[in-house]
Image: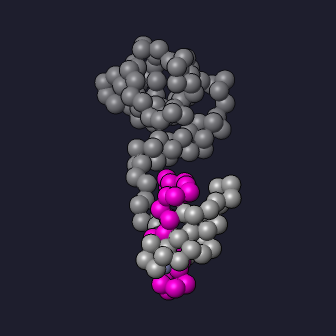
Amino acid sequence: MSQKMPTTGGPIESNCSRCEGVTNHIVVAMVGEKVVRVECNCCGTTHAFRAPKQPKATTPRKAAAPRKTAAKKAAKDEVAWQQEVAVLDPGKAVVYAMDAVLGKGQLVSHPTFGLGLVTEIIVPNKAQILFESGRKLLRCALSS
Ligand SMILES: [Zn+2]
């Protein structure tokens, strides 16, 4: 909200008792940043500034739901990782390499992605691994 600062001699909206409503006024006197006296543009009276009651345009902010399904999905993977991978013994992880022999359920330690769990083997040579940052499809050798 960029509300323009009122200045002496500048326009401002105020309640006018004579006009019985909010009308345009001219700022006559100010104290600091506060408008104290105004002159009504309609009836010409000078009176104390009475800020118009603003119904404060109640912007319903609920309507616009943030759409971040991608982030949500990643967060889901993160939760899955916390529940399924973080609880496992990292000492059992094999260091990931392109020729690493992986099987479903194998714990993997990746130099970049960290600890991961093989959730699926995709024949002939790929493994879907659940890392904390999300699922990744990495190359591997098959265990059977
Ligand atoms: Zn007036």
Q: Which residues are magenta?
A: 1-26
Which residue does the image show at 53% across and 71% down from the upper left? Answer: 39
- Name the residue nearer the viewer: 95 or 51: 51
Which residue does the image show at 64% across and 60% down from the upper left? Answer: 30
Is residue 52 in sight in this rendering?
A: no
Image-based side of 74 in relation to 30, left or right: left
Question: Per the image, is 15 magenta?
Answer: yes
- Name the residue nearer the viewer: 107 or 4: 4
Q: Quadrant of the C terminus?
A: top left
Number of marks in the rendered image? 0
- Occupied quadrant, residue 95: top right
Question: Per the image, is 47 magenta?
Answer: no
Which residue does the image show at 42% across and 14% down from the upper left? Answer: 98
Image-based side of 118 in relation to 126, left or right: right
Relative vertical location of residue 140 with respect to residue 120 in this rendering, above or below? above
- Occupied quadrant, residue 89: top right
- Name the residue nearer the viewer: 82 or 54: 54
